Amino acid sequence: MVINVRNEIGGFDYAGSRDSGVKIREALKTNLEKGDKVTLDFVGMTGVSHSFADEIVGILVRAYGVDLIKNKLMLNNATAEIKSLLNLVIRESRKISA
């Protein structure tokens, strides 16, 4: 499954709120729980906030562990800044869930 982040947040090029990530997290959760691989496509996105990143991956890492995310979640078209922020949130969430 591929989730186009920009489409899911209403066509904006920056995702700044937790609310904008809820639908994406729910879709991720449903598919990851089934064992499906999911790709988040950040095409056309200039950035995301820490809150948004925590909503879409941090909560899942705290609930299911980092291995599920590492093995089943892929990123397309993410800028270096988006990747860096997602990795930061994953590291922070690992500490909380440990």
Image: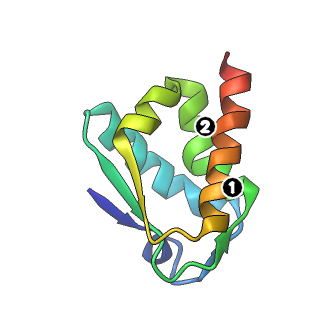
| Picture residue at 49% right of the left edge, 25% below the top | 64
Determine whether label 2 and label 1 are within 8 Å by CB.
no
Q: Is residue 81 above or below residue 23?
A: below
Q: Say the numbered circle drawn on residue 59.
A: 2
Where does residue 33 sit, x and y in percent of width and height?
Answer: 33, 32
Number of numbered discs visible in the structure rendering: 2
Count neighbours of disc 2 (C-alpha within 10 A) and say few if under 14, some if 14 to 19, many if 20 or more.
some
Where does residue 92 sit, x and y in percent of width and height?
Answer: 73, 35
User: Is residue 57 found left or right of 77 in the rendered image?
Assistant: right
Where does residue 67 sit, x and y in percent of width and height?
Answer: 45, 27
| Picture residue at 49% right of the left edge, 76% below the top | 6
Question: Disc 1 on helix, strand or loop?
Answer: helix
Of the pair 93 and 16, the residue shown nearer to us = 93
- Residue type at mark 1 is Leu
Q: Which tag, 2 or 1, sits closer to the chain's start?
A: 2
Count neighbours of disc 1 (C-alpha within 10 A) and say few if under 14, some if 14 to 19, many if 20 or more.
some
The residue carrying mark 1 is 85
Of the pair 23 and 38, the residue shown nearer to us = 38
For marks 2 and 1, give the one nearer the viewer.
1
| Picture residue at 45% right of the left edge, 78% below the top | 43
| Residue 27 visible in the snapshot | yes
Question: Disc 2 on helix, strand or loop?
Answer: helix
User: What is the distance, in whole Å, between disc 2 and disc 1 at their CAs?
Assistant: 14 Å
- Residue type at mark 2 is Ile
User: Is residue 74 found left or right of 23 in the rendered image?
Assistant: left
User: Is residue 37 found left or right of 45 in the rendered image?
Assistant: left
